[in-house]
Image: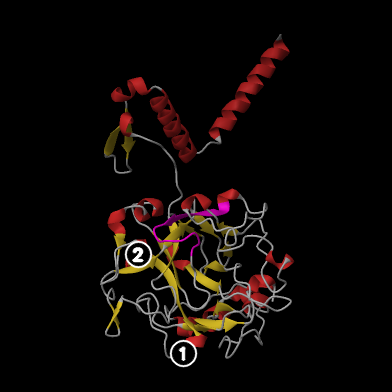
Amino acid sequence: MENDADNGRSHTKQIQQHIKRINDNQMKKILLSLFAIVALATSGFAQSWNMVITREDGTQEAIPASKVKNVKFEMADQNVSQVIIKELYNGGCQPDNGGRFFQMDKGFILYNNGNEVAVINNLAVGIISPFNSNADSKWLKNGKLVYDGQGYIPGIHGIWYFQRALVIQPYSQIVVNVNGAIDNTKTYSNSVNYANKDYYAMYDPESGYNHELYYPSPSELIPTSHYLKAVEYGLGNGWPLSVTSPGLFIFQTKDVTPHAYATNVSNIIYAPGAAQNPVNADLKIPTEWVIDGMEVFSAAHLGKNAKRLPAEIDGGSVLLTNQQGHSLYRNVDKEETEKLTENKGKLVYGYSMGVTTGDPSGIDAEASIKNGAHIIYMDTNNSTNDFHERKAFSIRGK
């Protein structure tokens, strides 16, 4: 009996020690969650319950339980401005045995360009109207963008958004597949293998983006939590990221989810003189929401390209020769990268993957990263200065 009592006391002590290890924030989450569960489960008594929130300054806010639909905890935004578009691959590649080029393998890379963790809630991806830089645009009047200086840009056709807060470690990246989240190299050796557990994929057939050639079932290696969701307000069953000259941007909605904002018809706009139908529908996206953007011009239409992104987002452009497997890659900020003491002896020079002039820094970023270096990329909000055309998408290992 004495041994049983000792064992009981020992067990009780272990429980007490375990409880002590739960910090205050965890306990707050547990208690709030339990309250929500009880209040929602006993809906018959919900009218008499309040959720009372006490702020740091001691002020309180009472919310009737009957008005509480759900309780969840989200990570706070951190260092959002550090996240940039590092690389875009959208032009397609040549097949192995001749014939039409392959383009259902688009993707891009987001990168944390700073030395602190970046956390972004409600992160979304859009393309600006019109789809191609050489297309006629009703948004352009007398050589000037109608919306320039008006605090918004027109996002065409639909948007994609991350299901949860995106967390990117310092000097790290995430790969986002746009089309064909599979190992495309099995059928096109010049293409891209997206079968990777760390990659993300635009895949949401229920949204209306369900063209099987665009969106085969993603590789089983990609977790479903890494699928981006979509809202389509245009016409068609595939998100039409241009194969020649897109204007790609990432943005963060404020005080509203991307889904709620994009499904609110009051946020749909039309270019002056355009018929108000799904073919011409654009989403009015506040400029202040835009985190980063890049203006791509077609090398095949020199003299016919026109700006779509205003200067406050991108004051320049970068040329793309499509169908050749090329990507558009951000230039290295040589001065800032060389300043990092941890990069001593790790930077690799003699970069040779540029199609024409390449990266002015001369630093081979991918080789340097493999060598353990941290890279800081150019970010002047001008794609002419910030990007160059690269011979291959970097995730191909070249």
Query: In the image, residue 261 lies at what x, y percent?
Result: 35, 54
Callout 2 environment at 10 Å: few (<14), some (14 to 19), or many (20+)?
A: many
Residue 282 numbered mark, or none: 2
Which residue occupies the foreground of this view, 299 or 34? 299
Find numbered disc 2 in the image and state the secondary structure of the residue it sits on.
Answer: strand
Find numbered disc 1 in the image and state the secondary structure of the residue it sits on.
Answer: loop
How far separated are the C-alphas under marks 1 and 2?
26 Å
Residue drawn at point x = 42 percent, y = 87 percent? 304
Callout 1 environment at 10 Å: few (<14), some (14 to 19), or many (20+)?
A: few
Which residue occupies the foreground of this view, 84 or 150? 150
Residue 158 among magenta residues: no
Query: In the image, residue 110 lies at what x, y percent?
Result: 53, 66
Q: Does residue 159 appear left or right of residue 394 in this picture? A: left
Which residue occupies the foreground of this view, 120 or 200? 200
Residue 345 higher or lower than 266, as above or below: below
Q: Does residue 161 appear left or right of residue 147 in this picture? A: right
| Amino acid type, callout 1 | Leu
The residue beneath circle 1 is 302
Residue 163 higher or lower than 79, as above or below: above
Q: Does residue 260 appear left or right of residue 369 in this picture? A: left
Which residue occupies the foreground of this view, 268 or 361? 268
| Amino acid type, callout 2 | Asp
Q: Quadrant of residue 251?
A: bottom left
Residue 374 higher or lower than 162, as above or below: below
Region of the chain picked out in magenta, as a range? 226-239
Q: Can residue 56 be seen by looking at this rendering?
A: yes
Q: Can residue 372 be seen by looking at this rendering?
A: no
Q: Quadrant of residue 136?
A: bottom left
Q: Does residue 361 appear left or right of residue 140 in this picture? A: right
Residue 232 among magenta residues: yes
Query: In the image, residue 141 lies at what x, y percent?
Result: 27, 81
